[in-house]
Image (cartoon, rainbow, N blue to C red):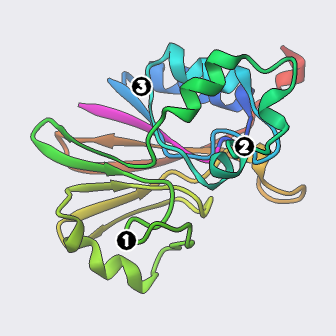
Amino acid sequence: MRIGIVSDVHCDHEGLAFVVSEFAASGVDEIILAGDAHNQYRFSNEVTELIREHEMRYVLGNHEEILLRPDSRAITMPAVRADNVEFVRSSPTRIRTIVSGKVLTVVHANPFEPNFDYLYPGNPAFSRCDELDTDYLVLGHTHVPMAERIGRTLVVNPGSLPATLPQGVNRSIAYAILDIAADEATLIRRPRPDFTQA
């Protein structure tokens, strides 16, 4: 079983479509999106429809938490499809499942508290991974790629798509592939294509 992992898309539907095509070429069996598919003040029909079309396992992030508040004007804009909003609203904040006999946990940020603390590589909170009783922990939020075994748990953060980064930062597309049979994750970075040249 090979799982494609992406996070922190932030409405970059072109980048997500590119990553989906990369996953297809790599022969992944399924895709996980570890939160922040949207921006807190902008909803993307295109991103949501890619999630739905490819039946991605998807958890909500801090941007969705703000976006889905009752006073949010972004989800009532005329171009926003109500069925897409309902799909996002019904998505979980955490997934815990069994894949090929291994326990897989997916959250957007801090798995230990119901908050959005940033857990960068080396954060002391990762020493608590054994409390999660999981073989794989997938998260995002920091935009910093990470694949590190901590105790029995392989922690994977795929990074983010470059549209979320400021100008002047290396604007490559980051994602990961988790190979359950090999019990390893590969972090991948590709130059962002010029989608205007299509």
Q: Amino acid at mark 2?
A: Pro
User: Seen in the image, is 194 located left or right of residue 118?
Assistant: right
Magenta stretch?
1-8
Distance from label 1 to label 3 (Cα)?
32 Å
Q: Earlier in the sequence, mark 3 or mark 2?
A: 3
Is any atom of residue 54 visible in this view?
yes
Q: In the rendered image, which quarter is residue 98 located in?
A: top left
Q: Earlier in the sequence, mark 1 or mark 2?
A: 2
Q: In the rendered image, which quarter is residue 195 located in?
A: top right
Q: Is residue 81 above or below residue 123?
A: above
The quarter of the image holding the C terminus is top right
Tell me what residue is drawn at x 76 percent, y 49 percent: 164
Q: Which mark is residue 70?
A: 2
- Label 3 sits on a secondary structure element that is helix
Residue 132: % across, % down: 23, 65
Residue 82: % across, % down: 69, 18
